């Protein structure tokens, strides 16, 4: 090595872009030397610092963390690495959750059907917040029943969610029509039957066992991307169904 390198030369030797080197210089991570003409240049000592930066970046440290570490005369290396390992494990778990959710979304997506985008996103959010839903159900149903709900085979769960999305999309598209119409009531009936299959009990009994606070906390209509008028219309249609169904002794 000749011991004196322009920014371009140093960039080629280290495999780092000129722009990155300039940024590292600006933030004080890897300060370049300056010639009399105020031009940046690097010497052999910069290679050692760059190796440290590359290694720490590979281990997942942020540039802020790297700068702090390089500024120290000595590190508690084991502690730093243990902390970083925990952070990387958290990131790995997050990535695994994202991949799981993406796989679920791909399985739900059906090119043959037109699904309301907002409803689709809400279903996927439901997958993300599965633990929260489980916690809420544990407050209103026996633990054994909750375990049965969440042990439904994956393929069956996806088929139910597809059906659910299609019914909600159809209801959303029919907002403003007569909620008593047979077509609307059949859709509501299908929704209620699906819900009964999931919770394993009569829909009337389920809602009667909920107090106001529990109902408001997890009301499905609150979590779906419906406009106020759509929510009111769907609630009216459901109320008509419940009253009619109760009148039939259902």
Image (tube, rainbow, N blue to C red):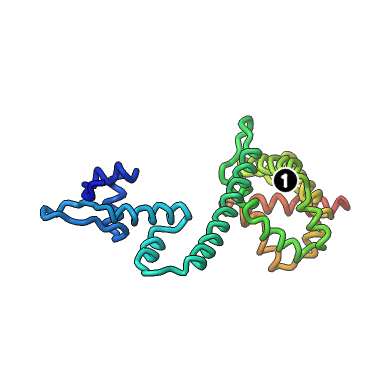
Above/below status of 121 relative to 204:
above
Residue 238 left/right relative to 59 = right
Residue 81 % position (x, y):
51, 62
| Residue drawn where x is 65% and y is 38% of the image | 107
Pick the front one: 227 or 116: 116
Image spot of residue 118 (x, y percent): 57, 46
- Residue extending furthest toward the front: 1
Q: Is residue 145 above or below residue 77?
A: above
Q: Residue at x 43, y 56 (%)?
A: 56
Residue picked out by circle 1: 180
Q: Name the foreground residue: 132 vs 227.
A: 132
Is residue 229 toward the left or the right of residue 243 in the image? left
Q: Percent from the top left, x then y, of residue 200?
A: 83, 53
Q: Farthest left residue?
A: 37
Would you say 50 lies left or right of 156 here? left
Name the foreground residue: 212 vs 30: 30
Q: Nearer the viewer, residue 240 or 39?
A: 39
Mark 1, residues whose alpha carbon is within 10 Å: few (<14), some, or many (≥20)?
some
In the current view of this chain or complex, which residue is farthest to the right?
249
Question: Of helix, strand and loop, which one carries label 1?
Answer: loop
Residue 190 location, quadrant: top right
- Image quadrant in which you'd find residue 63: bottom left
As drawn, which residue projects farthest toward the top? Answer: 112
Note whether residue 116 is visible: yes
Displayed quadrant of residue 132? bottom right
């Amino acid at each position: 090595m000749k011991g004196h390198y322009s920014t371009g030369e140093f960039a080629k030797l280290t495999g780092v872009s000129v722009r990155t080197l300039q940024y590292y210089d600006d933030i004080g991570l890897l300060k370049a030397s300056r010639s009399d003409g105020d031009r940046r240049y690097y010497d052999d000592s910069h290679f050692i610092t760059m190796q440290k930066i590359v290694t720490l970046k590979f281990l997942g440290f942020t540039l802020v963390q790297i700068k702090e570490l390089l500024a120290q005369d000595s590190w508690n290396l084991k502690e730093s690495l243990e902390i970083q390992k925990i952070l990387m494990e958290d990131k790995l778990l997050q990535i695994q959750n994202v991949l799981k959710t993406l796989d679920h979304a791909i399985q739900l997506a059906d090119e043959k059907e037109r699904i309301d985008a907002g409803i689709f996103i809400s279903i996927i959010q439901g997958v993300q917040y599965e633990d929260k839903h489980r916690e809420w159900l544990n407050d209103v149903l026996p633990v054994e029943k909750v375990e049965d709900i969440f042990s439904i085979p994956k393929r069956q769960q996806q088929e139910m969610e597809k059906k659910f999305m299609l019914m909600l999309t159809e209801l959303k598209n029919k907002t403003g029509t007569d909620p008593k119409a047979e077509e609307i009531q059949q859709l509501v009936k299908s929704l209620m039957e699906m819900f009964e299959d999931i919770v394993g009990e009569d829909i009337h009994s389920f809602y009667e066992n909920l107090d106001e606070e529990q109902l408001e906390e997890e009301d499905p209509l609150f979590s779906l991307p419906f406009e106020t008028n759509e929510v009111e219309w769907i609630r009216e249609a459901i109320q008509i169904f419940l009253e009619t169904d109760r009148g039939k002794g259902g």
